[in-house]
Amino acid sequence: MKIHIRLMALLVCLAVSGPAISGWVQYATGEGFTWFYEEPFLRREGQLRSFWIVKSLAAPDDKGASSYRYLVQFDCAKSRYRYLSERATKDPMGEGKILSFDDTFTAWTEASPSGLMGHLKTHACRPT
């Protein structure tokens, strides 16, 4: 009986925790989309921090993409960010067939403290 109760408790925890189990943490929602960042895969190089974020759509867009996956880099010393890579994917959460990609680095942009990227910068640049 104790094993069944423990198994049920584990299943409930897995069901409730959702994307965080696989390393994805939800950080914002909007009309028709949800943003996630990948918690355990933060890469550090001096004052630079890089990790993946995903914009998961409620319904596929006109390109057939259900999500967009971005590799974003933050410069903690200068409070700015840029995109290093973008992938449009057929399935949610940046999975499935890649419909388009762009590996052109964007220009640096200020991470406004009150915006979504400011929130992510706070997360990325916190001390270890």
Image (spheres, rainbow, N blue to C red):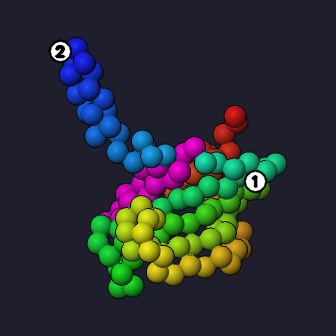
* Quadrant in the picture for the N terminus: top left
* Residue drawn 67% across the image and 55% down it: 50
Q: Amino acid at mark 1?
A: Leu
Q: Nearer the viewer, residue 14 or 59?
A: 14
Mark 1 neighbour class, 10 Å CA radius: few under 14, some 14 to 19, many 20 or more: some
In this picture, is 1 found above or below 35?
above
Q: Is residue 31 magenta?
A: yes
Occupied quadrant, residue 4: top left
* Residue drawn 68% across the image and 78% down it: 104
Q: Looking at the image, can residue 97 be seen?
A: yes
The disc, 1 or 2, on the residue closer to the chain's N-terminal end is 2
Residue at label 1? 48
* Residue drawn 22% across the image and 14% down it: 2
Alpha carbon of mark 1 to alpha carbon of mark 2: how far? 51 Å
* Quadrant in the picture for the C terminus: top right
Q: Nearer the viewer, residue 71 or 34?
A: 71
Residue 42 relative to residue 8: left or right: right
Q: Amino acid at mark 2?
A: Met
From which residue to which does the magenta span run?
24-40
Q: Taken as a whole, is the magenta stretch helix, strand or loop? A: strand
Q: Nearer the viewer, residue 82 or 111?
A: 82
In this picture, is 8 found above or below 34?
above
Residue at label 2? 1
Residue 52 relative to residue 55: left or right: right
